[in-house]
Amino acid sequence: MDTSTLIYCALALAAGCFVQSTVGFGMAIVAAPIVYFFEPRFVPGTVTFVGLVLALINMWQYRAMISLKGLGAAFVGRVPGTLVAGALLLYISAEALALVLGAGVLIAVLISVLKVRIRPTSTSLFWAGFASGLMGTTTSIGGPPMALVLQHAEAGSLRANLAGYFVFSCILSLITLSATGHFSWWHLKYALMILPAPILATWFAYRIQHLIKAEWLRFALLGLCSFSGVIAIWQGLSPQMA
């Protein structure tokens, strides 16, 4: 492994961890495309492991604000969402599904901008977990559905519950990746080498997050959701444009 490649990947993941530690999600949105450009073998295994460590740190940092009842509904929804995505991919292409889900995220963002409030009930969190399973399995970006449901929560609660959800989600993904040969000691070794930079970025995010106003946080969240929707649509259209 070239040292410069490792440094670039570490910096990309550090930037993604900084964003996620301040907004609540976004590590994969920011880091994965850059990491893939420099070292495709790091996606998704190495990136997912770094995401797990980040989620564990954030969950511990905001542990007093975690709602296990609400997260339980999201956890339950995540599993069938993943299974349904796998089943759908047997009949339709990943690109077609990504196109539909990306459009769905953009519609949800538009609804949010129009001041339609989605309450974080057990039912809405279940379906957010389900949608996250669908989107995460097909596009590798599963955060937006959960973030949209929790967007009106207090900043600490938003970060805490998203972190708790991502711990479960990353563990589920790593088990699946290990079973299919996409996460091994090689991926773990380089993830551990990269980790100091993301951890330092996370520490820095904690030091400045008190400067971020709640309204700014919500706008950043909606912006990241919009960006993820556009990425999903681009993934769906790119084979047709090739």
Image (cartoon, rainbow, N blue to C red):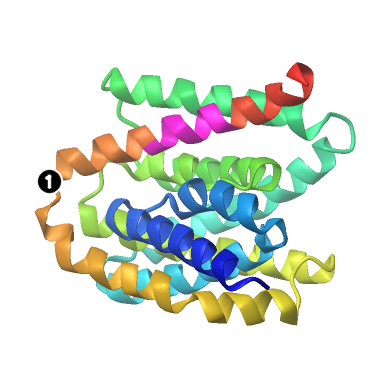
**Residue at mark 1:** 213
The structure residue drawn at horizontal position 65% and vertical position 24%, both measured from the top left corner, is 100
**Dot 1 alpha-carbon crowd within 10 angstroms: few under 14, some 14 to 19, many 20 or more:** few
- 229 falls in the magenta region: yes
The structure residue drawn at horizontal position 89% and vertical position 38%, both measured from the top left corner, is 90
| Position in image of residue 149 (x %, y %) | 39, 40
User: Can residue 111 be seen?
Assistant: yes
The structure residue drawn at horizontal position 18% and vertical position 40%, both measured from the top left corner, is 216
17 or 222, which lies in front?
17
**Three-letter code, disc 1:** Lys
Quadrant of the image for the N terminus? bottom right
Quadrant of the image for the C terminus? top right
Q: Main secondary structure of the magenta part?
A: helix
- 22 falls in the magenta region: no
56 or 195, which lies in front?
195
User: Can residue 69 be seen?
Assistant: no
The structure residue drawn at horizontal position 77% and vertical position 18%, both measured from the top left corner, is 240
**Horizontal relation, residue 169 to residue 65: left or right:** right
| Position in image of residue 209 (x %, y %) | 18, 59
230 or 123, which lies in front?
230
15 or 178, which lies in front?
15
Compared with 237, 53 (above or below) is: below
Element on which disc 1 rests: loop
| Position in image of residue 225 (x %, y %) | 43, 35
| Position in image of residue 124 (x %, y %) | 46, 40
Find residue 110 and report its image quarter.
top left
- Give the magenta part as a residue range: 224-231
Q: How many marks?
A: 1
Compared with 117, 33 (above or below) is: below
Compared with 225, 193 (above or below) is: below
